[in-house]
Amino acid sequence: MKTLINTFKNPSIRIIIIYIVMSGLWIFGSDWVLENFINELLFLGIDLLAVLKGIFFVMLTGWLFYKLIDRNFRAIQESEERYRKLVESLPEVVLVHIEGEIVYINEAGVNITEAKNAEDLIGKHILDFVPPKEYNYTIMRMNKVQEEGESELREQNIMLPNGRYVPVEIRAFQTTYQGKSAVQVIVRDITERKQSAEKIKQLAYYDTTTGLPNRNQLNEYLKNKIKHSKSFSVMLLDLDRFKVINDNFGHDIGDLLLAQVSERLNQCTDKESFLSRYGEDEYVIVLESVEQKAISQTVEKMIDELSSPFHIKGNEMYMTPSIGISVYPKDGASIDALIKNADTAMYAAKGEGRNSYHFYDLKLHKKNQRKMQLEQSLRKAVEHNELTLYYQPQVDLSTGKFVGIEALVRWHQKELGFISPLEFIPIAEETG
């Protein structure tokens, strides 16, 4: 019942129903009129009455068809006007082309192409807005629309008359325009989305203080490097006593110093090198060369570059680096191993007086292992009663008199045996 009511609401169906009813009434009723009024209209003649009846029927049906066509035509006009206003108000570009020639484009298309008005764009070929390197692919997509009726959504650039590129999303499908076969293209400007994605990428893969690649990007780079390269070297550079500057001058000055350090380091590396900020005061540099002579030249250039004073907000500062170098695959086949061994070499450089560099070797590994073992054992030495206190008298050699006592500590580790004070005291002082 509801469906029947909805059907009757259709104006075309209502007119047809009225037409059928009135036609039926006229067919059957007109003869009754003739029979009842025959005496009064006899003088007109039967043939004339039949003609008048036909004329009246034609006029009635003509009027009904006019109302039907007029109403439908108005509805189509209103629908087209609504669609036109909708298309004109869309933020997306909507254009129609026939064999590549633009025959319609909305206001968004005028704005994105920086044209004065739509008339300036009508008649132009869509390839006028395609970068030359994408001509062939665009033509292939146009042919695909002709064959399959539509194309998938795709990102590409459009080229403006001034040469500027705009990133967009494009989708096309077949349509008709003024009775001709055409293609409608929907274009969405994705500049803001691309910029947002770039900002996210910047935060994820770049250090905000120095603008250098961060640890995340370094890891990605090294993964790819290990996968595709036979050999390369990794440098871990630590800024000596940077914490002192941060504590005394504040983090703002420290950040400005890091930015200047990064600029100087960047000047020391070539295009094939990869410079990244690894930690607060640490940098990792990946070099193509694995020859000690070439690496040493680069490292010495960095040390020399950083030796000049830094001038920041009226403060003159000096920085020295300690640098450790490991080589792939000799010193490690994984990212962790390469960084760890470069770090070991860096601490060896610090131990040699800072402002220097050191290549990783197996001796360093053994030395570092022993140091860690001694550090762990020293923490439990008191608990295990491994430390022994000795008192040594002090005598004035000129008089032979007793002047004092010197306290000495000796350490006998149950597994390592006697440990020299020269070896364990620096560890105790370093670890607290």
Image (spheres, helix red, strand yellow):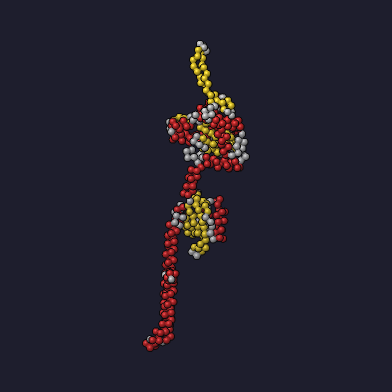
Q: Percent from the top left, x then y, of residue 338?
A: 58, 37
Q: Percent from the top left, x then y, of residue 108?
A: 45, 55
- Identify which residue is drawn at 55% across, 56% down: 141
Q: Which quarter shows the N terminus?
A: bottom left
- Which one is nearer the viewer's eye here, 424 or 192? 424
Could one spot residue 406 in this view of the protein? yes
State which quadrant residue 63 falls in: bottom left
137 in relation to 388, above or below? below
- Identify which residue is drawn at 49% across, 30% down: 241
Q: Percent from the top left, x then y, of residue 309?
A: 48, 30
- Identify which residue is drawn at 60% across, 37% down: 332
- Identify which residue is drawn at 47% across, 40% down: 208
Q: Percent from the top left, x then y, of residue 160?
A: 49, 51
403 in relation to 116, above or below? above
Could one spot residue 43 in this view of the protein? no
Count of marks overlaid on the render: 0
Q: Residue furthest top?
A: 399
- Which one is nearer the viewer's eye here, 129 or 308? 308
- Which one is nearer the viewer's eye here, 134 or 364? 364
